[in-house]
Image: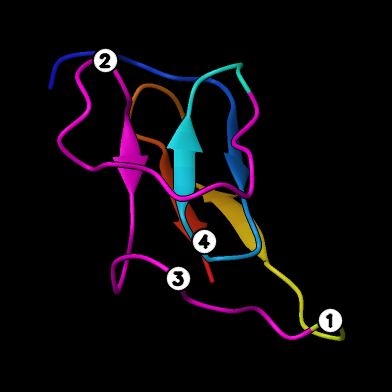
Amino acid sequence: MGVQYTQFSVNSNGVLRLGGTAISNTQYSFAAAGLSLIAPFGLDQYIDPTGKVHCKLLGTAPARRLVVE
């Protein structure tokens, strides 16, 4: 959408939010204006307490890619 971000956060439902405001564990309305959210499956997913979210930054500026698993 033309906006560059340098921060992101992920909640226990697997929803990723771009930007400096940390995402909470409450459910989000994906129609909410102004929220840059990425959700692989939609609402109410679950990351096991022993699970992890991995991320890696690939490439060099200005062609960097963020991979989140």
Which residue lies at the image location 61% right of the left edge and 56% below the top edge?
56
Binning the other alpha carbons within 10 Å of mark 3 as few (below 14), some (14 to 19) or many (20 upward) gives: some
Please, which residue is most extreme toward the right here?
Answer: 50
Identify the mark at residue 68; answer none if there is no mark. 4
Give yes or no for contact between labels 1 and 3 (Cβ–Cβ under 8 Å). no
Q: Quadrant of residue 52?
A: bottom right
Q: Which residue is mark 1?
A: 49
> Could you tell me which residue is drawn at 34 percent across and 16 percent down?
4
- Residue at image position (77%, 83%) is 51
Residue 22: percent from the left, percent from the top? 65, 28
Region rendered in magenta? 22-48
Q: Residue at x 65, y 78 (%)?
A: 47
Q: Amino acid at mark 4?
A: Val
Q: Secondary structure at mark 1?
A: loop
Q: Quadrant of the C terminus?
A: bottom right
User: Whole-Å distance between the Cαs marked 2 and 3?
Assistant: 21 Å
Circles 2 and 3: CB distance less than 8 Å?
no
Q: State the residue position of label 2.
A: 34
Say if residue 9 shows up in the picture.
yes
Q: Nearer the viewer, mark 1 or mark 3?
A: 3
Residue 9, position in %: x, y? Answer: 62, 40
Question: Can you tell which of label 2 and label 3 is closer to the viewer?
Answer: 3
* Crowd band around label 1 with a 10 angstrom C-alpha radius: few (<14), some (14–19), many (20+): few
- Dot label at residue 22: none
Instruction: Say which element carries label 2.
Output: loop
Q: Which residue is mark 3?
A: 44
Marks 1/4: CA–CA distance: 18 Å
Kindly report the distance in space between the C-alpha atoms of the residues bearing marks 1 and 2. Answer: 30 Å
Visible in this render: residue 59?
Answer: no
Q: Mark 4 or mark 3, which has the lower sequence index?
A: 3
